[in-house]
Amino acid sequence: MKSQATTICYLLLFLATECSHYRSKIHIKDGDKIQHPEGKPKTGRIQEKCHGPCITFSNCSQPCAQHFRGEIGFICNQNKWQKSTETCTSLSVETLFEDSNSASRLSVAAASIPLHILDFRAPEPIESVAQGILKNCPLDYACITDVVKSSEATAGNIAFIVALLRNISTDLSDNVTREKMKSYSKVANHVLDTAAISNWAFIPDKNASSDLLQSVNSFARQLHIRNESENIVDELFIQTKGFHINHNTSEKSFNFFMSINNSTEGILGMLEIPRQELWKLPPNASQAISVAFPTLGAILKEAHLHNVSLPRPVNGLVLSVILPDRLKQILLTFEKINKSWNARAQCVGWHSRKRRWDENVCETTLDIRHKVKCRCNYTNAVMSFSILMSPKFIDNKVLDYVTCIGLSLSILSLILCLIIEATVWSRVVTTEISYMRHVCIVNIAVSLLTANVWFIIASNFNKKAQDYNWCVAVTFLSHFFYLSLFFWMLFKALLIVYGILVIFRRMMKSHLMVIGFAIGYGCPLVIAVTTIAVTVPGKGYVRSDACWLNWDNTKALLAFVIPALVIVAVNLVVVLVVAVNTQRPSIGSSKSQDVAIIMRISKNVAILTPLLGLTWGFGIATLIEGTSLIFHIIFALLNAFQIRDALRMKMSSLKGRSRAAENSSLSPTNRAKLMNR
């Protein structure tokens, strides 16, 4: 009886100690972080800035609020202290299992175990998470979920939870059951909540997000499915499904519908294993597992890659898949999160070792306003997939209207130019030089007209179902005819120089024609074919956001920019040559003749500049990331209307002129006038 009374006394003493300990834990001073036993903790006052002068790029740190370990880092930006990093954490390995240890000691006392068994000392520190889980909850990991879910999702706690999940996937993934996967996902769901997204930016380790994805995928790989079809995890921000499959299985699909902002409105995602892939499986059963994340795309940080603009925004679910090694190809459908984003989507896979999105493992088969379909290659290094949207798309109605109206007028002007050339052809092609000059005009008009037509096709093609091969074909034709435009401009410039400098020796018309077509179409064909042969095998010929030459990965755009800029430079030299030769007055010229010569120089420059494409130099500015919209508008205006201006000059030059006047003189000045009429 005395022994029982002693045990009861010790039990009461233990309860009092525990209650006192619990009260000390929740005792709060005004202004500290408020810890609520149920639900997520709320945030009280935290030191928001450093004291003292703020000098640009200087930094400082402040301690975390009471009950948190770590510090908050600040950096001075534009004379204001801004938070840059945070390591504030209330979690530790000991706190994860503190309640479990207390409960176990209470149950021992209640069972009237002899007094010498009771131990009221503080529990011994647990050296690893695995040891604590194996000791307290080896079957379902449930002992850690409540502690994690009740913690505040500070940057420090997020980093701790990511490390916790990484350790579990490394040390406790021998036999992953449905119950373990549920507990594991509840922990991951806590840091994937939309309320925690903003705090990911302050984690010092920028690889934390990719570590989380890799840990979840590694843990799910060890999951054993019991039933034919299972909805294993159904949390708000992480879902897991699985199937048993074999070579006789029909096409299998994983369908996900997940919320983005804790609302009933959600987005869809679907992963499909094609029938021809399932044929590769052996008769015995295998399993396929898929994990979906609606918010992970917003926090995944890519490793810096040269010539790639970061960040590249994700506009759909992130879908992970764990398949048998024999399966290599999957089909995915993503509903777009931001459906008003007027830019083309790019299907990508997350490369776990490179820690970045890989565009080469996926092909976009459909891209419409609401959804995107992808065909992707699955490997052990690339198990997660999503869609990216171009961050460099210029969405401006003014530019759209300028381009649309300008191209329409340009096409009409080009057609009118060709009709006029056909009408007056016999009157103006009286010499070899004049014949070749008009051949140049016709081919320039044909090249620009054809290039504009393909440009319109490519623009409309982007808004409809995208097919990679068709996009390559459209881009190749646009590339070829725009290059032809420039090379015919080059031949026109060379012909002007030939007409001015070479007076006494003339080439045959047939020789000039061969040279003209070799330059005008032969050179562009060689450049375009070489470019496509080098870049297409690696899918680097076209851009991810438009049917045009790639810049980010292969720099295929240089195959257009370099020839165009070189020709523009040559044409500038030609303008100078024309100016120098036409300003030489003949013997006996008067001052009024000098004035007339200056006027002719101005006219030569005014005609040559738009006709030879010097205004395309504004296109350089449009290639620079972050360039002002005004450069795009100027570039569109000058190039859309340059043929209209050239046509107007052409019409005015035909008025009041006769064939006899064209051949009246062989002086350099009159030759220049002839060449530029």
Image: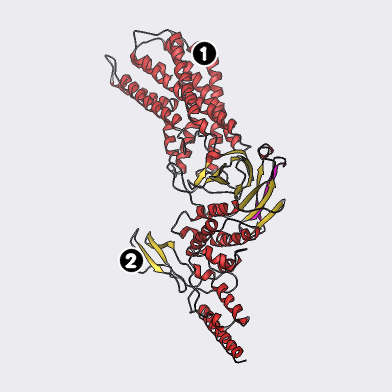
**Residue, far left:** 587
* Pointer 2 residue: 53
Decide which of 447, 110 is in the foreground and name it: 110
Is 171 drawn above or below residue 564 in the view shown? below
Rendered location of residue 498, percent (x, y): 37, 15
Q: Is residue 116 visible?
A: yes
* Pointer 1 residue: 425
Rendered location of residue 670, percent (x, y): 37, 15
**Residue, far bottom:** 2
* Between marks 2 and 1 in the image, the one whose residue lies nearer the viewer: 2
Label 1 sits on what residue type?
Trp
Q: Is residue 579 magenta?
A: no
Question: Which quarter shows the N terminus?
Answer: bottom right
Range drawn in magenta: 248-268
Rendered location of residue 214, percent (x, y): 53, 52
Q: Are marks 2 and 1 in contact (CB under 8 Å)?
A: no
Is 120 drawn above or below residue 627 in the view shown? below
Is 104 drawn above or below residue 299 in the view shown? below
Callout 1 crowding tier (Cα within 10 Å): few <14, some 14–19, many ≥20: some
Callout 2 crowding tier (Cα within 10 Å): few <14, some 14–19, many ≥20: few
Label 2 sits on what residue type?
Pro
Q: Is residue 253 magenta?
A: yes
Report the Cα–Cα distance between label 2 and label 1.
78 Å
668 lies left or right of 275: left
**Residue 377 image-quadrant placement:** top right
**Residue 380 image-quadrant placement:** top right
Decide which of 606, 585 is in the foreground and name it: 606
Q: State the mark number for residue 661.
A: none
Question: Which quarter shows the C terminus?
Answer: top left
Helix, strand or loop for disc 1: helix
Residue at 44%, 64% in the rendered image:
87
Helix, strand or loop for disc 2: loop
